[in-house]
């Protein structure tokens, strides 16, 4: 099973998590995080351990605990490092991913970027693409996580609590806020009913979800605007254009179905495989080979102009810089998003009960 497909399976399994641990209506994840930490030993000793680790990774990310989020998810996924023939990459060089995609976009209607839900850094590429793609004529931003109600209100004034589960994470909220400011129409396309149809037939569940996602993109955008140019932000491997196997079943992901339904060949990017991990043993050998040279989100390109991609269902793999921590926060908050620290006077702090 490919890594992306494993993560899709895990993502679907998360639907069975107790609803009582969902983010409360006020959008504050801290009480949930405290509950998870307080009951950590019990969860880790139970059959719910995989779900607990995945869920805690998401909540860690909401609170800006990026290293903890990566560690929790790696413990959940347990992915062994891949073995590659690195000699085949002789002569390959790094190029900026934003610049490369902007050039490619001249001849593409659809760009699909894959993120890891627990890693806010994997949202930076889509954020940084918004403005240059807008100048190229892209007017739609389709996001897997968006709430169905945005299908009726595609241009809200700002992202709201409840507009999407992962939008409670500040970097994701910033992505959507930036898109709204530029004028993008927001398009939800996920299967909003999947939690009600949870089944132990995981292959059937995944295929049903992929089919509905592709149909929603077709019907909500291209049926009305055949020449639309669309940036699609997906979770994990939904943008895979090749088929995968799960036991004796075949998985046909959203991007492949979309291509078949519309005849449009999207440019698909893996934005999460080639990044750092708390334990370097989990890092891809390609990432370990090049990470010291990665100063911004980059692609590897061959001497004949091909982007590095381990799978014929993807067009490129993005390499993410290692995270430098500044004041307990990820350094890319400053370098990529131009954030700065603000001192909060002590009298303004609210003591915890």
Image (spheres, rainbow, N blue to C red):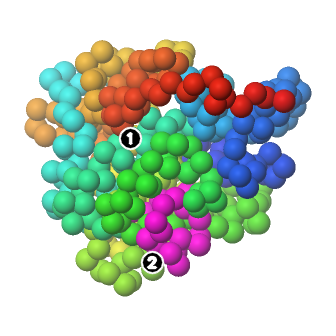
Query: In the displayed structure, would residue 282 be above or below residue 95?
Result: above
Q: Which residues are magenta?
A: 141-159
Question: Which tag is nearer the camera, tag 2 or tag 1?
Answer: 1
How many numbered marks does the figure carry?
2
Q: Main secondary structure of the magenta part?
A: loop
Residue 60 figure quarter: top right
Residue extending farthest left = 304
Q: Residue at x 45, y 80 (%)?
A: 219
Q: Position of residue 39 (x, y in %)?
A: 86, 29
Q: How crowded is the residue under tag 2: few (<14 C-alpha within 10 Å), some, or many (20+)?
A: some
Which of these two is toward me, 230 or 337?
337
| Mark 2 and mark 1: Cα distance apart in space | 26 Å
Q: Earlier in the sequence, mark 2 or mark 1?
A: 1
Residue 220, label in figure: 2
Left or right of residue 252: residue 50: right
At 29% across and 49% down in the image, what residue appears? 129
Would residue 110 be seen by someone viewing this image from the given angle? no
In this orientation, which residue lies closer to the viewer: 110 or 257? Answer: 110
Is residue 199 shown left or right of residue 190?
right
* 155 falls in the magenta region: yes
Residue 1 part of the magenta segment: no
Going 19% across and 21% down the picture, which residue do you hit?
A: 90
Q: Is residue 113 above or below residue 317?
A: below
Give the SS element for disc 2: helix
Q: Disc 1 designates what residue?
A: 124
Residue 226 placement, left or right of 340? left
Assign a secondary structure to mark 1: helix
Image quarter of the C terminus = top right
At label 1, counting other C-alpha atoms closer than 10 Å, the crowd grade (few under 14, some 14-19, many 20 or more) is many
- The image shows residue 2 at horizontal and vertical percentages of 51, 40
Specify whether residue 347 is in view. Answer: yes
Point out which mark residue 15 bears: none
């Amino acid at each position: 099973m490919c890594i992306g497909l494993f993560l899709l399976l895990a993502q679907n399994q998360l639907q069975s998590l107790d609803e009582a641990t969902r983010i409360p209506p006020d959008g504050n994840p801290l009480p949930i995080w405290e509950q998870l930490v307080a009951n950590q030993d019990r969860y880790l000793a139970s059959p719910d351990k995989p779900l607990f680790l995945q869920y805690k990774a998401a909540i860690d990310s909401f609170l800006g605990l990026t290293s903890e989020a990566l560690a929790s998810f790696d413990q959940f996924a347990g992915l062994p490092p891949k073995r590659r023939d690195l000699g085949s990459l002789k002569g390959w060089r790094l190029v900026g991913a934003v610049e490369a995609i902007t050039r490619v976009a001249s001849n593409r209607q659809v760009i699909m970027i894959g993120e890891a839900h627990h890693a806010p850094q994997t949202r930076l590429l889509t954020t940084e693409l918004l403005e240059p793609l807008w100048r190229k004529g892209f007017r739609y931003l389709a996001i897997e996580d968006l709430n169905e109600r945005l299908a009726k209100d595609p241009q809200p004034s700002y992202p709201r609590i409840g507009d999407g589960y992962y939008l409670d994470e500040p970097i994701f909220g910033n992505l959507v806020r930036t898109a709204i400011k530029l004028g993008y129409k927001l398009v939800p396309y996920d299967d909003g009913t999947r939690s009600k149809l949870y089944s132990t037939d995981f292959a059937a569940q995944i295929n049903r979800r992929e089919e509905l996602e592709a149909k929603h993109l077709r019907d909500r955008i291209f049926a009305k605007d055949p020449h639309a140019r669309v940036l699609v932000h997906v979770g994990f491997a939904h943008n895979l254009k090749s088929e995968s196997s799960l036991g004796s079943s075949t998985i046909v992901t959203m991007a492949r179905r979309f291509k078949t339904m519309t005849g449009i060949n999207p440019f698909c990017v893996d934005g999460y495989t080639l990044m750092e991990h708390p334990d370097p043993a989990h890092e891809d050998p390609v990432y370990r080979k090049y990470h010291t040279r990665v100063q911004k989100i980059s692609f590897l390109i061959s001497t004949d102009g091909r982007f590095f991609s381990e799978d014929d269902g993807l067009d490129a793999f993005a390499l993410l810089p290692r995270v430098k921590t500044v004041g307990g926060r990820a350094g890319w908050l400053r370098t990529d998003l131009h954030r700065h620290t603000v001192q909060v006077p002590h009298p303004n702090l609210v003591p915890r009960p």
